[in-house]
Image (cartoon, rainbow, N blue to C red):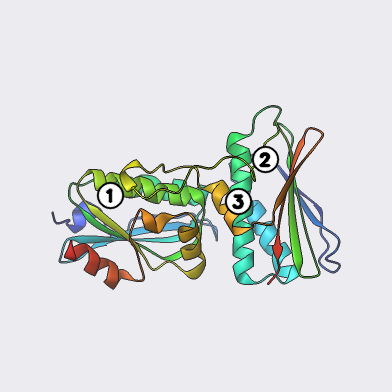
């Protein structure tokens, strides 16, 4: 189940919000919503791609690895002002900070390389200004960067 | 080792009817026995699920030489990268070689940020990839 809560292109200080069910099948719907929001805010194509990728990685990580009570939908809000965007992802599950989790070192040998585990590194390297907070039972991840 | 068209299947497609979901997969084999696999579409979780089995199946030959052409891949997420690494490892384990080529700027940035060029050769186009594979 997907429902659009609010849409406000004209006043970008107001967040554009979206609620998604906890399903991998929702990711493309979220991407489509986000592309629309980013286009309305005037993000550059390169930054739009980066944010879409990082949102995809953050959500995939939640959908595949979140622990604890995970039945609630995930709430996203996008806002842009003064050349800076913020995409906030709020979801209820066990505390997990994707920005400080220990990542494996870079690999140089194909034979021993792990296929998995590159999503968080992508997110952290591509949007280094992002931040995480824990509010009550919710993980709040804010992906942020410059619109250009 | 030389692949024939019947081995690799020309024009195999994994498509869906609605826009934005289709992931194309086709494979062609040149006179030097280098198979070029062209992927097109979104290599996110859903798209990768559509093509991963085909990728693994059609590269499961001994001493094969493969190019994966990414020119028409519009989006590459970590699940797509995972699939590329799995295929590259399988090819290497069978004594073969694989190169990636022609990603667009954003996909190239994603690959570089994920450290892929340290594991799998990343070439600018098919010609460079073919030359590299033939030389080895």
Which residue shows up at 34% across the image and 48% down it? A109
Whole-Å distance between the Cαs marked 1 and 2?
39 Å
User: Where is mark 2, residue-wise?
Assistant: A97
Q: Are marks 2 and 3 on the same chain?
A: yes
Q: Residues within 10 Å of mark 1 (few under 14, many from 20)?
A: some
Query: Residue B81, how many percent across, how many down?
Result: 44, 51
Marks 1, 3: nearer the viewer: 3
Where residue B134 sits, quadrant-wise, is bottom left
Q: Nearer the viewer, residue A86 or A32?
A: A86
Which residue shows up at 68% across the image and 72% down it? A148
Secondary element type, mark 3: helix
Whole-Å distance between the Cαs marked 2 and 3?
16 Å
Q: Residues within 10 Å of mark 3 (few under 14, many from 20)?
A: many
Location of the C terminus of chain B by quadrant is bottom left
Taking A137 as reference, is B105 left or right? left
User: Where is mark 1, residue-wise?
Assistant: B58
Query: Residue A49, how many percent across, how many down?
Result: 59, 63
Question: For the view shown, which residue lies furthest in the left direction?
Answer: B1
Numbered circle sitting on residue A56: 3
Residue A94 visible in the shown view: yes
């Amino acid at each position: 189940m997907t429902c659009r809560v609010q849409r406000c292109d004209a006043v970008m200080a107001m967040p554009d919000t979206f609620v998604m069910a906890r399903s991998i099948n929702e990711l493309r719907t979220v991407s489509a919503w986000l592309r629309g929001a980013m286009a309305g805010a005037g993000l550059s194509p390169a930054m739009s791609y980066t944010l879409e990728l990082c949102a995809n990685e953050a959500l995939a990580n939640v959908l595949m690895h979140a622990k604890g009570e995970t039945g609630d939908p995930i709430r996203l809000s996008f806002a842009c002002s003064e050349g800076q965007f913020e995409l906030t992802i709020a979801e209820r599950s066990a505390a997990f900070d994707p920005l400080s989790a220990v990542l494996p070192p870079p690999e140089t040998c194909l034979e021993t390389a792990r296929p998995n585990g590159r999503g968080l590194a992508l997110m952290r390297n591509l949007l280094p200004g992002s931040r995480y907070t824990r509010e009550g039972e919710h993980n709040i991840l804010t992906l942020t960067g410059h619109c250009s | 080792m030389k692949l024939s068209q019947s081995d690799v299947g020309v024009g195999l497609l994994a498509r869906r009817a609605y826009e934005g979901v289709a992931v194309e997969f086709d494979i062609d084999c040149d006179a030097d026995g280098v198979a070029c696999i062209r992927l097109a579409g979104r290599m996110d979780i859903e798209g990768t699920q559509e093509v991963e089995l085909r990728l693994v199946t059609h590269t499961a030959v001994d001493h094969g030489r493969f190019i994966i052409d990414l020119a028409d891949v519009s989006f590459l997420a970590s699940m797509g990268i995972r699939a590329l690494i799995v295929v590259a490892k399988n090819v290497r384990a069978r004594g073969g070689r694989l190169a990636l080529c022609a990603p667009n700027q954003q996909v190239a940035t994603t690959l570089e940020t994920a450290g892929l060029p340290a594991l799998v050769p990343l070439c600018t186009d098919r010609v460079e990839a073919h030359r590299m594979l033939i030389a080895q």
